[in-house]
Amino acid sequence: SATMHHNRNSGEATTRAKSEFRSNMTNELRIGFAVALILVAGAGLMSRRAVVTQNEQSHLVSHTHEVIQQLDAIVADMYAAEDFERGYILDLKEQWAVASDSAADRVRADLVALRGLTADNSAQQRRIDSLEARVPRRLALIHAGIVARRVAGVDSANAIRHTLVGQMLIHETRAIVDPMLAEEFALLRARGL
């Protein structure tokens, strides 16, 4: 009977030990699972933040490229208006005058678009103010050259085309656009591109 009592106590002790072991293992598994869950959630949050940051960076880079393209468009359309004016003065074909007027309209639209794109940049806005003071004067001289050719002939048109004011306005426009482009390229470099 003592042996039976010892075996029963030993069996109960074993059962208690197993139960305690299971209880401890369950707690350890719960803790381990909770730690793993926290680590996975933390990694997920960090990944999401990285994606959001990358998206924001990508948007900024794309926006900067839009500004650069708009500045390039202003310069290209200004030169196009001048080239078409020159074509009209040389051969008096109305298609050149129409093309010059269309290019001038694009320059005006380009300036409006540029102002919208740079609304968050006060330095660029001040430069656009300067452009808006000069570009219409240059476009008016281009148009005056076309009108002079129609009314008074080649010499009168060329006199307008080659005025010191016209040349000065071309150089002043470039002197404004070039720093604008430099600022945008500096932004790209700062963004790692």
Image (cartoon, rainbow, N blue to C red):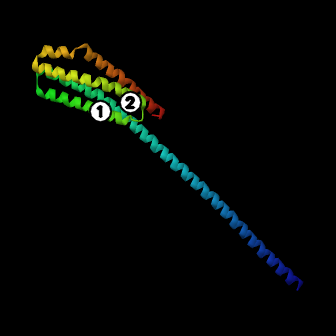
The disc placed on residue 110 is 1
Is 178 situated above or below 36? above
| Percent x, y of residue 27 | 69, 65
Residue displayed at 26% across by 15% down? 165
Closer to the camera in the image, 123 or 58: 123
Q: Nearer the viewer, mark 1 or mark 2?
A: 2
Residue displayed at 35% across by 36% down? 116
Q: Residues within 10 Å of mark 2 (few under 14, many from 20)?
A: some
Q: Which residue is mark 2?
A: 125
Residue displayed at 18% across by 25% down? 84
Q: Earlier in the sequence, mark 1 or mark 2?
A: 1
Q: Quadrant of residue 111?
A: top left
Q: Quadrant of the C terminus?
A: top left
The disc placed on residue 25 is none
Mark 1: which amino acid? Asp
Mark 2: which amino acid? Gln
Q: Quadrant of residue 129?
A: top left
Q: Is residue 73 visible?
A: yes
| Percent x, y of residue 37 | 60, 58
Left or right of 55 in this view: 13? right
| Percent x, y of residue 87 | 16, 22
Q: Secondary structure at mark 1?
A: helix
Q: Quadrant of residue 26?
A: bottom right
